[in-house]
């Protein structure tokens, strides 16, 4: 039982660490928040340098960015974008610090993780059936290509951290200040139409530069990956919108979300296509007019 609560407690602590930075930035001037951030970083550099300094840098930037957005009365998704930027910059700085100052070779660590995954995958299929050398080589290539997606994965991780931090910040500030901060309904989430063109630009670039050895491959691959994930979120929000307009049972989008969490690869492409159709044809506007 104790071994179960340790990771749960660690996750809880991890997500609550940015809250003090968020609250302080929300309640004070930006210059005061910068001073507070510098002092905290200085203290962190004295105690447990290898752990506390990168963690303070990451959580401080993310929490402060969201607190600043809330203080400026930005729209919820604008604040989320600021938080995503703060966390993404923090992750990159942690990567640089650990690489150059703490001698952590992230490339080697990622390589080791991929090799372990390949070993687990191979041993599993050896038990349940035969795995051809062609299938193994294809899986190996797909795994190694994940290395090139690190920039987009950093932004996606920053988005996830920012959403959780902002949601917690809303709850705490509402309790302290009596405000009514909250995210708008997910069915109202909508991205700019220009995102479609970014996605297709990435697809075209991948056709022109298909080899990882090409310098533009990294740009094209990450542009396609990031825009594709955002378009999938657009498609998911359209399902919520459609259920609301058609007055279908609310369990329908919940089932889609659960399936998306369990099998993200399976639903990623259909949701992406739905997001492209929603933005390109302005389906929400058409459905609203018909109603």
Image: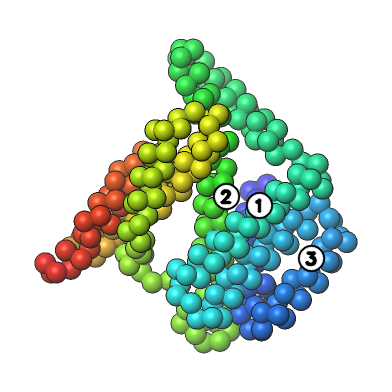
* Residue occupied by mark 1: 92
Of callouts 1 and 2, which one flags the residue occurring earlier in the amino acid sequence? 1
Marks 2 and 3, how far apart in space?
22 Å
Q: Mark 3 points at which residue?
A: 41
> Helix, strand, or loop for circle 1?
helix
Q: Earlier in the sequence, mark 2 or mark 3?
A: 3
Q: How crowded is mark 3: few (under 14 residues within 10 Å), some or many (20 or more)?
A: some
- Identify the residue at image location x=68%, y=66%: 60
- In front of the other: label 3 or label 1? 1
Q: Is residue 285 above or below residue 127?
A: below
- For the question of whether residue 63 can be seen, the reply is yes
Element under disc 3: helix
Q: Is residue 189 above or below residue 31?
A: above
Residue that carries the numbered disc 2 in the rendered image: 154
Residues marked 1 and 2 touching at CB (< 8 Å): yes
Q: Quadrant of residue 185?
A: bottom left
Give the residue displayed 70% in from the left and 33% down from the top.
Answer: 108
- 189 or 280: nearer the viewer: 280
Measured as percent of width and height from the top left, residue 272 is found at: 33, 47
Is 239 or 235 nearer to us in this picture?
A: 235
Residue 275 coordinates in the image, percent (x, y): 30, 52
Q: Where is residue 209 in the image (x, y as percent from the top left)?
A: 46, 32
Find out whether the residues at labels 3 and 1 contact each other: C-beta distance under 8 Å.
no
From this view, report whether residue 13 is shown above or below residue 206: below
Under circle 2, the secondary element is helix
Q: Left or right: 289 with respect to 41?
A: left
Observer-nearest of 22 and 5 = 22
Disc 3 versus disc 1: distance between alpha carbons?
17 Å
């Amino acid at each position: 039982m104790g071994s179960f609560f340790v990771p749960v407690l660690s996750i809880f602590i991890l997500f609550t660490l940015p809250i003090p930075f968020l609250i302080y930035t929300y309640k004070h001037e930006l210059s005061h928040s910068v001073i507070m951030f510098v002092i905290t970083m200085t203290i962190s550099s004295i105690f447990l340098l290898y752990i506390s300094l990168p963690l303070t840098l990451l959580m401080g930037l993310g929490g402060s960015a969201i607190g600043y957005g809330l203080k400026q009365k930005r729209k919820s998704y604008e604040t989320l974008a600021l938080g995503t930027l703060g966390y993404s910059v923090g992750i990159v700085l942690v990567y640089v610090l650990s690489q150059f100052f703490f001698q952590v070779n992230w490339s080697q660590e990622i390589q080791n993780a991929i090799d372990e995954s390949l070993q687990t995958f191979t041993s599993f299929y050896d038990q349940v059936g035969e795995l051809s050398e062609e299938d193994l080589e294809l899986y190996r290539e797909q795994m190694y290509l994940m290395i090139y997606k690190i920039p987009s994965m950093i932004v996606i991780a920053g988005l996830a951290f920012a959403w959780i931090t902002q949601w917690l910040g809303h709850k705490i500030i509402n309790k302290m200040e009596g405000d009514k901060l909250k995210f708008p309904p997910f069915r109202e989430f909508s991205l700019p139409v220009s995102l479609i063109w970014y996605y297709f630009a990435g697809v075209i670039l991948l056709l022109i530069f298909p080899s990882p050895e090409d310098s533009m491959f990294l740009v094209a691959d990450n542009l396609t990956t990031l825009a594709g994930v955002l378009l999938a979120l657009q498609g998911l929000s359209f399902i919520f919108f459609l259920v609301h307009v058609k007055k279908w049972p609310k369990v329908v989008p919940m089932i889609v979300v659960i399936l998306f969490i369990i099998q993200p690869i399976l639903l990623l492409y259909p949701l992406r296509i739905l997001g492209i159709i929603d933005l390109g044809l302005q389906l929400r506007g058409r459905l609203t007019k018909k109603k």
